[in-house]
Image: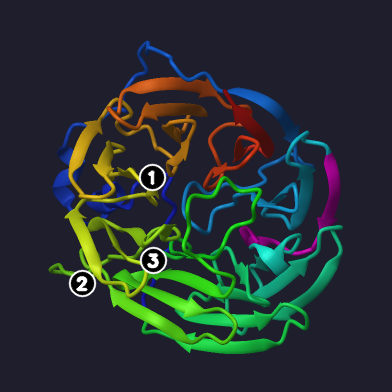
Amino acid sequence: MAVMKTSFSRPLGLGLCLVFLAACSSSPKLKPASLSAIDERIGLRAIWSQPADPAPSIGSSASGQGAFSPAVSAGMAVVAGREGQVQAFSLGTGQRLWGLSLGQPLAAGVGTGAASAEGQYAVVTRAGELVLIDAKGQLRWRQAMGGVSFERPAISSGVVAVRLADNRLVGFDKETGNRRWLLQRTLPSLVLHGESGLRVAPSPAAAALNEPLGPTDLLAGLPAGRMLWLNASNGAVVWESQVVVPRGSNEVERISDLLGSPVALSDVVCFGAYQNAVGCRQSANGRGIWQKSFALALPIAANEDWLIAVDASDRVAGFNRRTGERAWTNDALFLRQLSAPVLFAGAAWLGDSEGYLHGLDLQTGALVGRLRLEGGRPSGPMIATTEGLLVQTQAGRVSLLRP
C-alpha cells in the first residue's frame, strides 16, 4: 500500500510539480509576495506569552490536524511537544500550572472535549499509544491503539476517539482505556496522513459558534472525501456522505482528503477537500446545500456568514457561507507558506513562514491587521477562545492575543 505523508507548510502540488513534470525545472522560480504597508484597523497584542519548557521546537508541523495545536478546557491552555512533554497554562493569565514528560515522542497535539471531557486531555505517541491526562497533570492511562495515528484525538460521551493511519476509527473507554468500538473504512492508495480530523462539542472556554454537536456526537472527516456523523458512545453511524468523488488521471490527482475538522454551524456542516472543493451540507442528514470547485491546500475556517479557504499558491478566498458565492480573493500573501485560517475579532488570521500573523477583513478580504509572532509561525491550527486568540509556535512559545 502506497501512502503519502505531507505537511501543509508547503503546498503539496508545488512539490509534485518538481517530481512529476520535468518541464518544471526550466520554469522561472516564483517568489513569495513582499509585504507592503496596510491600513491596520485591527491591532492584536499579546496578553501573555510563555516559553513552553523545554523551549526547542514544541512542534514543527504547519497547519493540518496532525500538527501541534493547543487544547482549551477547564480554564487551561494545554500544549504538547514532539519530544513528549505536555504542559498546562492558565488561559486567562498564562501562569504555568503543570508539566508532564511522557518519555516518548508524540505524533500529534492535544485533544479534548466538553461536558464530562472537561479537564481531560489526550495525545498519541509515535509508538502507537493513546495517553489520557487529567486536569492536575496526572497520567490516567496509556493504551496501545493497535496502530499508529497522526491526528489529534477527541473526547466525547465517555470515549476517547482516534482515527488510525489505516483509516480505522476507534473509540476507547475514557475511564479504563479499553477499546469500546471500531469502525473501518477503505484507505485510498495515496493519502495525506495527519490532515483530516475529528470534531466534538467544544469546551465552553473555546469561542464556540452555534454548533449543533451534542454530548454524544462525533464528526469525522476522512480521506477520499468522506464525512461521517457518529454516536461517540458506541460508534454507530448517524449518517455518512461522500462529499467529494475522487477524479483524475492518476493517484495524485485523485487525492481528495478532507482537510482539518469539519466545521459544524447551527444546522450545517462545512468542509474542504484537498485540491477539489469547499462546501456545506445539512447537519441532520449530510445532504448537500452547496459546493464549489476550489484548489484547496489548507483546512477551512467558517462562521455563520463566511467560509475562508486558501489555495496551493496561498491565495485566500472568501465565500458566502449561505450561498457559496465567492465574494473576494486576496493574493497579497502569494507563496508566503500560510497556516490554516482562524476567524477572530471580525477577521481571518493566517500565519506565514516569517512568523507574521495577517488579518483579512471578512467582508472585503483587505489586509487589516499584522503582527510579528514571538517564536515564528504557528505550529498548528490557532484556537479562538473566550479570552483571545491562542497560538502555539514552532519555536516553543504559547501566546494569547487580542485587540
Q: First in sequence: mark 1 or mark 2?
A: 1
Residue 316, percent across and down? 30, 37
Say whether marks 1 and 2 touch (CB < 8 Å). no
Residue drawn at 68 percent across, 77 percent down: 158
Q: Earlier in the sequence, mark 3 or mark 2?
A: 3
Query: Is residue 103 on the magenta stretch?
Result: yes
Q: Label 1, label 2: how many angstroms apart (C-alpha)? A: 25 Å
Amino acid type assigned to the residue bearing label 2 in the image: Val
**Separation (CA) of disc 3 from disc 2:** 19 Å
Element class at badge 3: loop
Q: Residue at x 35, y 79 (%)?
A: 240
- In the image, taking residue 291 as reference, residue 336 lies left or right, namely right
How far is the residue under mark 1 from the one under mark 3?
14 Å
Residue 279 screen position, x and y as percent = 26, 57
Circle 2 residues within 10 Å: few <14, some 14–19, many ≥20: few
Mark 1, Cα crowd under 10 Å, few <14 / some 14-19 / many 20+, is many
Instruction: Name the quarter where the N terminus is drawn.
Output: bottom left
Q: For the stretch drawn in magenta, what is the main secondary structure?
A: strand
Q: Position of residue 353 (x, y in %)?
A: 46, 33
Viewer-proximal residue among 397 and 294: 294
Residue occupied by mark 2? 245
Report the magenta residues as a range: 96-112
Residue 188 visible at all: no
Instruction: Indicate whether 226 appears above or below 385.
Output: below
Q: Position of residue 112 (x, y in %)?
A: 65, 62
Residue under pointer 3: 4
Query: Residue at label 1?
Result: 10
Q: Indicate the quadrant where residue 110 lies.
A: bottom right
Which element is circle 2 on?
A: loop
Residue 115 falls within the magenta-colored stretch: no
Identity, as a three-letter code, of the amino acid under mark 3:
Met
Residue type at mark 1: give it: Arg
